[in-house]
Image: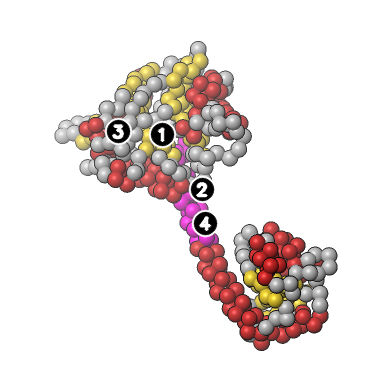
Amino acid sequence: MRVLVADDDPVTRHTVAALVRAHGHDPIIARDGAEALALHEADPFAVVVTDWHMPDLDGLGLLARIRAGDRDRYTYVIMLTGTGREAAAEAMEAGVDDFLVKPVAPAELGVRLRVAERIGAMQERIAAAGRQLDRDLAAAEKLQRGLLPTQTPPGLGIEAAWRFAPCGRVGGDALNLIRLDERHAAFYLLDVVGHGIPAALLAVQVHRLMSPLMSASSLLKRPLQGPPWYEVVPPRQVILGLADQFRAAFDRMEAFTLCYGVLHIDRHEVEIANAGHPVIVHRQAGGCAAIDMPSLPVGYFPAEQMDPPTVRLRLAPGDALILASDGLSEALRADGEELGVDRLMAAAAGAGDDAGAIAEAAMSAAIVWRGAPATDDQTVLVLHRPG
């Protein structure tokens, strides 16, 4: 183990270095705090043994500079003092890990170095686990973003845009726009209660269930005995199907809000069912109107206790349907006031006449209002019929 020894007194410096070497470690000496700092910044040491009182940069100053640079590593600092335990208490309050009273006793130094070695090994294990976690999070982030739609499916008669901004590496929001057949497309935005990895895992689980492929357990299409051999499941029934799938989620306190809709392509009509989702907005030529659909989230109640409301509306040329997570509407300003749905609608109403501009305006309104990094996932999906 490389040990940096810093002391302006040559006798103490070389004595401590010799003791370090006698305990099987590799000492590097510095004549004062400034030289010690330069050596440490050039090639960081796991352990630093430093005198307190040195010219220019004393031991506490060196400690402060070392701690300021300890971002991806930890340096174990042993302070040498000749003034007893009262001064040692002050040093440890400042962030010193251990202390020794001069003249240094060989056995005491050996004990301190063994402690430093154990703590250094523990810190390396923690750092390695942190690096592995970072790699895992990067993979999870890539996976979650890979589940987002890449483009608007062709032939829908609408344009779509979305923005997805988790408050961490991964988040509990999810959205999709998928073609079900030549006459129908499906869309949804869900928001899992909570944040981070557990919420992201649940969001991915729900996403997997919302597949347009036909199967015995399909939620979006139901098999028929004769041609055309299937039918598109109404949005209300999709939500009830999810509630049945997550019947046991209450015990695990897993829940999510969901707005799910089916686009009838030939009629430019959308049918929406809601499960606790707070922000559903219809933008028309005269401005924006909130679609009020009070309802229960999925996961807190069994399907038989839920009654998802359904709304049908036609998208006229120039109209847009906007779904946003509560990370936008509930964005808090420094004084604690929420952005609110009304301000969010005003931003969307003032945006340009295309889906991307509307989505960007909604996201920007929340970002500007908060003026600080978001504490909740922020997601918006816009379906716009060109005028």
Relative to residue 186, is residue 97 drawn left or right? right
| Residue 216 visible to the viewer | yes
- From mark 1 to mark 4, how far is it between C-alphas? 27 Å
At mark 1, the secondary structure is strand
> Amino acid under label 2?
Arg
Query: Can residue 55 be found in the magenta stretch?
Result: no
Relative to residue 240, is residue 157 drawn left or right? right
Q: According to the image, what is the colour scheme of the structure?
A: secondary structure
Number of residues whose C-alpha sits closer than 10 Å to that of mark 3, classed few (under 14), some (14–19) or many (20 or more)? many
Q: Is residue 343 above or below residue 72?
A: above
Q: Is residue 148 above or below residue 364?
A: below
Check disc 2 and report the residue beneath it.
169
Residue 368 in the image, given as x and y percentages of width and height: 61, 31
Highlighted range, magenta:
130-151
Number of residues whose C-alpha sits closer than 10 Å to that of mark 1, classed few (under 14), some (14–19) or many (20 or more)? many
- From mark 3 to mark 4, how far is it between C-alphas? 35 Å
Q: Residue at x 49, y 39 (%)?
A: 377
Q: Earlier in the sequence, mark 3 or mark 4?
A: 4
279 vs 315, nearest the viewer: 279
Q: Are marks 2 and 1 in contact (CB under 8 Å)?
A: no
Q: Earlier in the sequence, mark 3 or mark 2?
A: 2
Residue 300 in the image, given as x and y percentages of width and height: 31, 38
Check disc 3 and report the residue beneath it.
239
Q: Which mark is residue 189?
A: 1
- From mark 2 to mark 1, how far is it between C-alphas? 19 Å
> Amino acid under label 3?
Ile
> Amino acid under label 4?
Asp
Check disc 4 and report the residue beneath it.
134
- From mark 3 to mark 2, how far is it between C-alphas? 28 Å
- From mark 3 to mark 1, how far is it between C-alphas? 12 Å
